[in-house]
């Protein structure tokens, strides 16, 4: 380290130097586009810069530096600039591809699933435990953890302690145990997290995860079987609750709307 610090008690050091925005040759100061710390372009939540005719998104803004994040931001910006100007605010689609509420369309930088493609991979979505405690308070946060050897290694002729481990952490907050963080280290973490990220974006609670039948034998089933059964508050974050044997949601179609 250039500052003279020393790292002790580590067998492996992962270096992540990061990147800096490539804006030096754009002469942004001549068009009144303001830069922030580390030369990131300053934008508001709608990708507007300080110049009303120039927009910026993606890594150059320094929010969430992921390619899919930039794609999502670009799509929302295009919807806002070139989509229908309907005043609807319910987020539903209108007619033949018309996009509702495009005037206020923006991307969300919260609850973004992301993965470190290491060996094994590390997947994370939402808050860390310290972040959740800082926001909601220690007494309002409940943590679920699990460490196990993936069943793929079940037939390997090695000691159980020597088999590669999978680690999972579920962070919930509030009396309803809203899932605010999921963290996975282990084989398949990347594939697992995409689906659970959808559930988190929809406001899943611990009871919602418990309501899903486990797929056995998989590693992902640990996320829907954590903790003692039946102790989580029976509160759903879903628009239509899946708890306690409820019927599955049905789509609105021209057929059932006439019934």
Image (tube, rainbow, N blue to C red):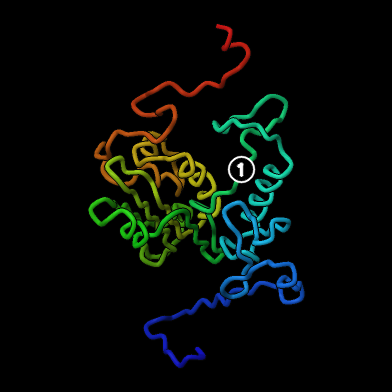
Residue 188 visible within the image: no
Task: Provide residue 107's location: percent of width, then percent of height.
Answer: 59, 48
Residue 73 location (% of width, % of height) = 64, 51
Q: Secondary structure at mark 1?
A: loop
Give the residue drawn at x 34%, y 62%.
130
- Residue that mark 1 sits on: 105
Q: Residue furthest bottom?
A: 4
Vertical position of residue 29 compared to residue 231: above or below: below
Instruction: Where is residue 205? Give x, y as percent.
Output: 37, 40
Question: Which residue: 27% across, 56% down?
Answer: 137
- Residue ID at (43%, 56%): 183
Q: Nearer the viewer, residue 212 or 25?
A: 25
Question: Left or right: 14 with respect to 25?
Answer: left
Q: In screen coordinates, is 62 left or right of 97?
A: left
Residue located at (58% from left, 57% from top): 44
Above or below, 33 relative to 183:
below
Position of the C terminus, as image quadrant, is top right
Q: Is residue 243 visible?
A: yes
Decide which of 217, 188 is in the foreground and name it. 188
User: Where residue 23 sits in the image (x, y, percent)?
Assistant: 71, 72
């Amino acid at each position: 380290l250039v500052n003279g610090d020393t790292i002790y008690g580590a067998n492996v050091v992962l270096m992540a130097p990061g990147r800096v925005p490539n804006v030096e040759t754009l002469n942004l100061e001549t068009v009144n586009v303001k830069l922030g710390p580390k030369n990131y372009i300053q934008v508001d939540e709608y990708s507007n810069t300080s110049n009303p005719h120039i927009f910026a998104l993606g890594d150059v803004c320094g929010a969430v530096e992921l390619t899919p994040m930039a794609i999502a931001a670009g799509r929302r910006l295009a919807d806002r600039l070139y989509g229908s100007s309907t005043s609807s605010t319910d987020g539903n689609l209108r007619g033949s591809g018309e996009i509702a509420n495009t005037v206020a369309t923006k991307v969300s930088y919260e609850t973004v699933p992301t993965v470190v493609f290491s060996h094994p991979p590390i997947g994370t979505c939402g808050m860390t435990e310290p972040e959740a405690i800082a926001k909601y308070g220690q007494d309002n946060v409940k943590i679920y953890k699990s460490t196990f050897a993936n069943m793929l290694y079940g037939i390997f002729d090695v000691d159980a302690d020597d088999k590669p481990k999978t680690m999972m952490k579920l962070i919930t907050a509030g009396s309803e145990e809203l899932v605010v963080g999921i963290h996975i280290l282990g084989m398949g973490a990347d594939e697992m997290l995409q689906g659970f990220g959808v559930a988190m974006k929809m406001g899943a609670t611990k009871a919602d995860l418990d309501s899903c039948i486990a797929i056995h034998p998989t590693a992902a089933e640990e996320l829907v079987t954590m903790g003692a059964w039946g102790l989580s508050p029976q509160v759903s974050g879903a628009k239509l609750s899946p708890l306690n044997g409820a019927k599955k949601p049905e789509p609105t179609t021209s057929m059932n709307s006439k019934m």
